[in-house]
Image (cartoon, rainbow, N blue to C red):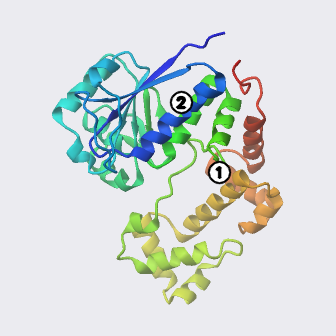
Amino acid sequence: MALPRSKFAFLTLPRYSMIALSNAVEPLRMANSLTGQPVYDWSIVSLDGTPTPASNGLQLSPTFPLEQAANVDILFVCGGVDVQKAVSPKMLSALKRFAERRVPLGALCTGGYALAKAGLLDKYKATIHWENLSALREEFPRIQLSDQLFTIDRDRFTCSGGVAPLDLMLHLVEQRLGARTSQLISEQFIVDRIRSDRDRQYVPLRAQIGVSHESLIKVAQLMEDNIERPLSLDEIASATGLSRRQIERLFKRHLNCVPKRYYLQMRLRRARELLLQTSMPIIDITTACGFQSPPHFSRCYRAQFGCPPSAERMSRQGKVLGGPRGELAPL
């Protein structure tokens, strides 16, 4: 039985990120190949139909005028370098017209800035590349910005840059065609794990606090190097030449948390990587990440990620094996 088509359009801003766009388009192509049906249509558009140079200097053809994308299921705005300069009043007006016609809107990499500037993310949860998170929080306080890889909130689909659009598209494919199809696509692209909207962008500490806080970076690096046997705050203070009070003040001022909490979240992130990317027994992960016992690990994990480690692993295994929603569409 023929499946109805989904139509996506990608509005390319000047100096957009080609890696982000490619990672969004290729899963759609592979879904068509695996199902043997044209399940997805996609088009590259610009305001006037002229191919837009990406940040790497290349252009994509064919490129169509934006007005031809009126009947798409989602219009994605593709951003990249110097996105503020790439957003024009004419573009903002065009995006507002699409919103008035209730066309779902999305954004890749820094494309979320255009939606934010047009007022189209107000009171929405949204994601943007980590380099732009702080600036957007300041400029657009009505947006509920997150450091997630991607965010879906009603008719808004936003994600960070790099390979994160691949995760967003695999999620959309899974919703429509089932987990088995999504998994097969990831296998074709040599992707070890399909990440969900619960996964966070990795924001380098230097990007969070700036390069002038070497003492804090030194403390965080010491924590990173001692995951299996967590150090006490006194041990960290002795190794770095700082006092406990100095360390606590640094974390409060620049990261808005206490050192113990930061250290715990670091260990839980490492545990989640091991849980989802390896076949290590949970008892071994417990030890490798410095937790006292499996029950202690489970309580901390549930508090951070919303489910115990055993349920997360079982959920991922179930998606890989497939089920009622995980069957591959008829070829």
Question: Residue extending furthest top?
Answer: 1
Residue bearing the label numbered 1: 303
> In this rendering, would 252 be left or right of 271?
left
Q: Given the image, on which type of amino acid does mark 2 rest?
A: Leu
Of callouts 2 and 1, which one flags the residue occurring earlier in the amino acid sequence? 2
Q: Quadrant of the C terminus?
A: top right
What is the secondary structure assignment of the residue under circle 2? helix
Q: Is residue 222 above or below residue 304?
A: below
Residues tagged 2 and 1 counted as in contact (Cβ below 8 A):
no
Q: Given the image, on which type of amino acid does mark 1 rest?
A: Ala
User: Does residue 122 appear in this view?
Assistant: no
Residue placed most toward the observer, 174 or 120: 174
Q: Position of residue 135 (x, y in %)?
A: 30, 53
| Mark 2 or 1, closer to the camera | 2
Q: Position of residue 196 (x, y in %)?
A: 59, 42
Which residue does the image show at 40% across and 19% down from the upper left? Answer: 72
Which residue does the image show at 54% across and 30% down from the upper left? Answer: 29
Q: Residues within 10 Å of mark 1 (few under 14, many from 20)?
A: few
Residue bearing the label numbered 2: 28
> In this rendering, would 191 be left or right of 65?
right
